[in-house]
């Protein structure tokens, strides 16, 4: 990667570490995904857990998204309060205790769908919303190879029948091709797993007399590969900013990334390297077997962020490579952008080298 997001004058005003987004790149990524899904005749419901930002969400909706995906009731509450009225909690919600009351309140404020992959989950949802109008719709989660949550495709019909017995309406099926993150070839295979597994799950619904309105895949690495066949909705999230991991998996240049961490060199204490003020509490700790270190330093591909402590990023350099001076600001492309955003209060917004805005991370920490 060769570019920073701000000119020298703007960099001098930063208090690092700080997360900066390039607005031109964000807008291009939003418009590009929206156009790609429109060409394929597939609805786009972006996952807001990446950006957690009302401002970004509004831009996605203005570009043609049909609604938002969220991971938690807390995220849904933030976006519903902002007037975004079509939300899907893509998670097997267990609406027990206080969460039951929160689910009922949300279902009365917006068009709401929630994920389920067990009879117990359905029973909690039904009990929580009994008497509310309307109850949330159910989207049954399918395991197509990620082996995290979800039922096998041929079990969907039986679970949907139980939902009907409890007075709940099944909207359709969804999956997350998380095994796409294992590598480049696995990304392509996972997209096919999504298409085939969701197709089989849809047939399982039809076998019990339910025509699925939504057949939803969800993974940035596979979004444009699985948008076909039976799939009629995609839920990518990371695409809006991109990160080091995504560019590797899709074989694109790191310059496509729309979010960077600006960090100051605070020490030369590391042999043949340096230390920056962006540690685990900004960069997080995600690593991948196909990437060296905890991020990529702009303009210095030889640098490896070999370890992160809370507030230290320890960077090694090969012999003969000049290290930046203490006090210099360096730019880092994080491995996985989603936890990075959740670690900060705001995003500094840049355009053409200048700071043009600051966006709050509105749903930061809304993890329940």
Image (cartoon, grey):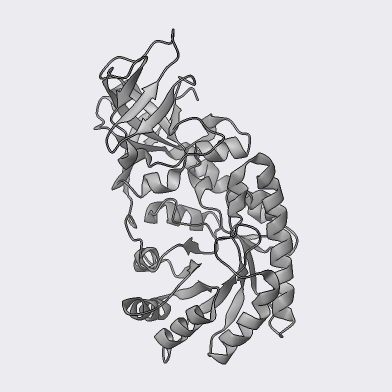
Q: Name the residue at 38% across, 35% down.
A: 350
**Residue 101 seen:** yes
Q: Quadrant of residue 280?
A: top left
Q: Nearer the viewer, residue 166 or 54?
A: 166
Instruction: Specify whether 151 is left or right of 355.
Output: right
In-front residue for pair 215/176: 176
Where is residue 212? Give x, y as percent: 67, 75
**In the displayed structure image, the side of residue 154 where residue 319 appears, left or right:** left
Residue 177 in the image: state x and y as whole percent. Answer: 61, 55
Q: Is residue 269 left or right of residue 331?
A: left
Give the number of marks: 0
User: Is 181 placed above or below 317 here?
Assistant: below
Is 259 in front, or is 31? 259
User: In the current view of this chain or complex, which residue is farthest to the top?
Assistant: 320
Q: Residue at x 54, y 86 (%)?
A: 168
- Residue occupying image coordinates x 62% and y 67%: 142
Say which quadrant the C terminus sits in.
bottom left
Q: For residue 5, say whether it is visible.
A: no
Residue 340, placed above or below residue 115: above
Q: Position of residue 96 (x, y in %)?
A: 37, 79
Q: Tell me the quarter of the picture where residue 76 sits.
A: bottom left
Q: Nearer the viewer, residue 41 or 181?
A: 181
**Can you give x and y, in whole percent of width and height, for residue 141 in the image?**
58, 69
* Horizontal side of residue 190 vs 336, given as left or right: right
């Amino acid at each position: 990667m060769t570019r920073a997001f701000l000119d020298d004058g703007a960099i001098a005003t930063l208090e690092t570490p700080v997360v900066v987004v390039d607005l031109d790149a964000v807008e291009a990524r939003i418009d590009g995904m929206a156009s790609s899904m429109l060409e394929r005749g597939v609805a786009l419901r972006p996952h807001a857990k990446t950006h957690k930002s009302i401002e970004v969400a509004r831009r996605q909706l203005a570009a043609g998204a049909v609604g938002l995906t969220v991971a938690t009731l807390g995220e849904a509450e933030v976006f519903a309060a902002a007037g975004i009225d079509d939300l899907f909690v893509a998670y097997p919600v267990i609406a027990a205790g206080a969460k039951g009351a929160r689910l009922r309140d949300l279902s009365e404020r917006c068009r709401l769908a929630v994920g389920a992959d067990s009879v117990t989950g359905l029973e909690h949802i039904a009990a929580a919303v009994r008497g509310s109008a309307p109850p949330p719709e159910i989207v049954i989660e399918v395991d197509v190879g990620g082996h995290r949550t979800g039922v096998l495709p041929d079990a969907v019909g039986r679970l949907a029948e139980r939902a009907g017995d409890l007075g709940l309406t099944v909207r359709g099926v969804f999956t997350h091709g998380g095994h796409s993150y294992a590598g480049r070839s696995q990304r392509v295979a996972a997209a096919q797993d999504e298409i085939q597994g969701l197709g089989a799950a849809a047939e399982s619904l039809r076998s019990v007399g339910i025509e699925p309105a939504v057949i939803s895949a969800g993974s940035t690495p596979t979004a444009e590969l699985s948008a076909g066949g039976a799939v009629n909705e995609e839920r990518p999230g990371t695409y809006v900013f991109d990160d080091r991991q995504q560019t590797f998996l899709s074989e694109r240049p790191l310059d496509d990334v729309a979010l960077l961490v600006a960090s100051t060199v605070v020490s030369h204490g590391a042999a043949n390297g340096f230390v920056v003020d962006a540690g685990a509490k900004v960069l997080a700790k995600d690593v991948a077997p196909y990437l060296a270190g905890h991020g990529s330093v702009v303009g210095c591909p030889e640098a490896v962020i070999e370890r992160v402590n809370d507030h230290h990023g320890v960077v090694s350099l090969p012999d003969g490579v000049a290290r930046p001076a203490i006090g210099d600001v360096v730019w880092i492309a994080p491995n996985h952008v989603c936890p990075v955003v959740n670690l900060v209060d705001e995003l500094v917004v840049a355009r053409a080298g200048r700071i043009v805005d600051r966006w709050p991370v509105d749903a930061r920490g809304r993890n329940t």
